[in-house]
Every structure is written in C-alpha cells, then in structure tokens.
Amino acid sequence: YIKSYYTMQRAVDPNDMAILCGLGEQVFSFEALYGCAGVISGMANFAPDVAYSVYEAAVARNFDKLAELVDSLAPFFSFRSKVLENHGPHTGIGEVGGNMYISVFKAAMDIVGLRGGEVRLPLVDLNEEETLLP
C-alpha cells in the first residue's frame, strides 16, 4: 500500500489533487511521512477524538505523537485482524482480505452506545465468539 501511495503521490500535482489514505489510521501513519493529506476513517464513527488526534499529529508532522497514538490502538488492530483471519479470504501471501472490518466498526459503534446495527448481505455480523475476543 505504501509503495502504491508513494507512486501516486509523486505522479500528481498536489495543487490539482489530494490523494487520501483509504485504509485507516494504521496505514495513514506511514503514508503521512510522504505528505498524505488525510484519511478515510472507519474509526471516526465510534472514536472520533482518537481518529482526529491521529490526523492532527500527522498533518503537524509530529511523528513521535503519531507513533504513540497508533501504538495505543494496537489492541483494536489486533482484534480487527483476528476477525479478518476468521473470515478470510486468505491471499496466500500472509494477508487476509475482505470487508469484515465493516462489521467490526458497526459492533464498535454499538459498544459505545451509537447505532451501528447489522451489516447488509453479502456481509455478515460478528458472531458471539468474536464479540467476546479480547
């Protein structure tokens, strides 16, 4: 992802087009090194203060603060990875693709008292076991 972003960023005039990170705060923290203008954040739906703090640290180029914030999100990223691992699809190169992150975001919204609700087919909600993952 970083290589693709780097290539795109170098191919356009930043005055004509802003290229955003569409993969959330974790990848954004790396793309920020190359001047990424912003992030598409699912986390902003249930933890907007955290998502905005990551953005602020990135645009201020405060990489120590950015690393601290992203490191503090490790339990969330680990949980999301476990859910993705449960549902695949497995790429064969050590990565897991798919859209289960949407189910994770909706469950997180429910947990903080917002209405995340159920996902629409063909996606599936988290199962009971997944809602109990640490």
Image (cartoon, rainbow, N blue to C red):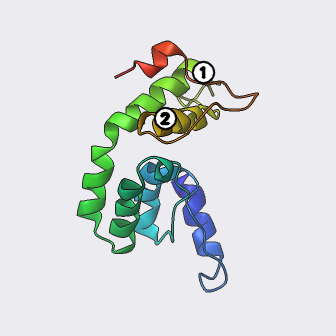
Tell me which residue sits at (63%, 67%) in the image.
8
- Residue 86's quadrant in the figure? top right
View extreme (right): residue: 122
Q: Tag 2, which secondary structure?
A: helix
Q: Give the vertical position of 124 relative to 9 (above or below).
A: above
- Mark 1 crowdedness (10 Å alpha carbons): few <14, some 14-19, many ≥20: some
Amino acid found under the numbered disc labelled 1: His
Q: For the residues marked 1 and 2, what is the alpha-carbon distance in whole angstroms?
A: 21 Å
Q: Give the vertical position of 29 relative to 43 (above or below).
A: below
Amino acid found under the numbered disc labelled 2: Asp
| Place of residue 6 in the rendered image (x, y in percent of width and height, measured from the top left) | 55, 64
- Residue 118's quadrant in the figure? top right
- Residue 103's quadrant in the figure? top right
Q: Are marks 1 and 2 in contact (CB under 8 Å)?
A: no
Q: Give the vertical position of 6 relative to 122 (above or below).
A: below
Q: Give the vertical position of 69 relative to 93 (above or below).
A: below
Tell me which residue sits at (29%, 64%) in the image.
63
Which of 106/64 is in front?
106
| Place of residue 55 in the rendered image (x, y in percent of width and height, measured from the top left) | 41, 64
* Residue position for label 2: 110
* Residue position for label 1: 87
Which of 29/109 is in front?
109
State which tag comes first along the sequence, 1 or 2: 1
Tell me which residue sits at (55%, 31%) in the image.
95
Quarter containing the C terminus: top left
- Mark 2 crowdedness (10 Å alpha carbons): few <14, some 14-19, many ≥20: some
Residue 70: which numbered mark, if any? Answer: none
Q: Tag 1, which secondary structure?
A: helix
View extreme (top): residue: 129
| Place of residue 122 in the rendered image (x, y in percent of width and height, measured from the top left) | 76, 27
